[in-house]
Amino acid sequence: MSRRLRFRGESRHKVDSKGRVSIPASFRRVLEAGDPDWVEGLNPNFVIVYGDQRRKYLECYTIDEIEAVEDRISRMKRGSKKRRILERLFSTQSITTSVDETGRIVLPAKLREKIGLSGEAQFASNVDTFQIWEPEAYEADLAETEEELDEFDDDPLTLLDEDDDEDEEI
């Protein structure tokens, strides 16, 4: 049985005037493993979902992971409101890109402007995906998460024991 690689950790990287930014090396290994067309010597492809105006970050999916999401969307009733919304968010409001030979990507101006990115980008793992944030927005989101943790009296690991489908998302 092969081991599935996951995104872990966080890091901050400089963004140059052309929108080039280095992807964390450990994230690149996951992108390579999640691209069925990748072989040594090629650049791994992945998908950046930028979504609607409420999204304060860019969500990055391996090719395998975005195809799993698209498969779930394809099984939904054609023409339904939910399917239409998800098609727009995951297909229309996304771009496919690749990591270059130096481990960098180019973030188009439209995406940088959407999240207010300029001098630095904050990378944050999200198990099956990773996110790219404007650093101050990321810090504010971390503070909000800390406040949410205060709602729980127990160790956060107890959240894994809950069988609560209300938080389940695609």
Image (cartoon, rainbow, N blue to C red):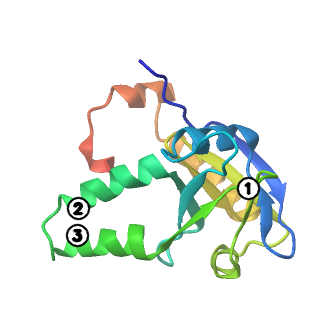
Identified at 48% across, 72% down, the residue is 51
Q: Is residue 170 visible?
A: no
Q: Residue at x 64, y 82 (%)?
A: 110
Vertical side of 124 occupied by 115: above or below: below
Q: Identity of the amino acid at label 3?
A: Lys
| Amino acid type at mark 1 | Gln
Which mark is drawn over residue 122?
1
Q: Where is mark 3, residue-wise?
A: 82
**Residue at 46% from the left image edge and 35% from the top image edge:** 152
Farthest-out residue, top: 1
Q: Position of residue 106 (x, y in %)?
A: 73, 68
Q: Is residue 3 above or below residue 6?
A: above
Can residue 80 be seen in the rendering of this structure? yes
Q: Between tags 3 and 2, which lies in front?
A: 2
| Label 1 crowd (10 A; few <14 / some 14-19 / many >=20) | many
**Label 3 Cα neighbours within 10 Å, binned few <14 / some 14-19 / many ≥20:** few
Could you tell me residue 129's position as x and y percent?
A: 53, 48
Pick whichever of labels 1 and 3 is earlier in the sequence.
Answer: 3
SS of the residue at dot 2?
helix
Left or right, 130 with reference to 136: left
Label 2 environment density (alpha carbons within 10 Å; few <14, some 14–19, many ≥20): few
Residue at 46% x, 75% y is: 93
Residue beneath label 2, please? 74
Q: Quadrant of residue 60?
A: bottom right
x%, y% of residue 143?
A: 65, 52
Of 74 and 102, the residue lying toward us? 102
**Badge 2 amino acid:** Ser
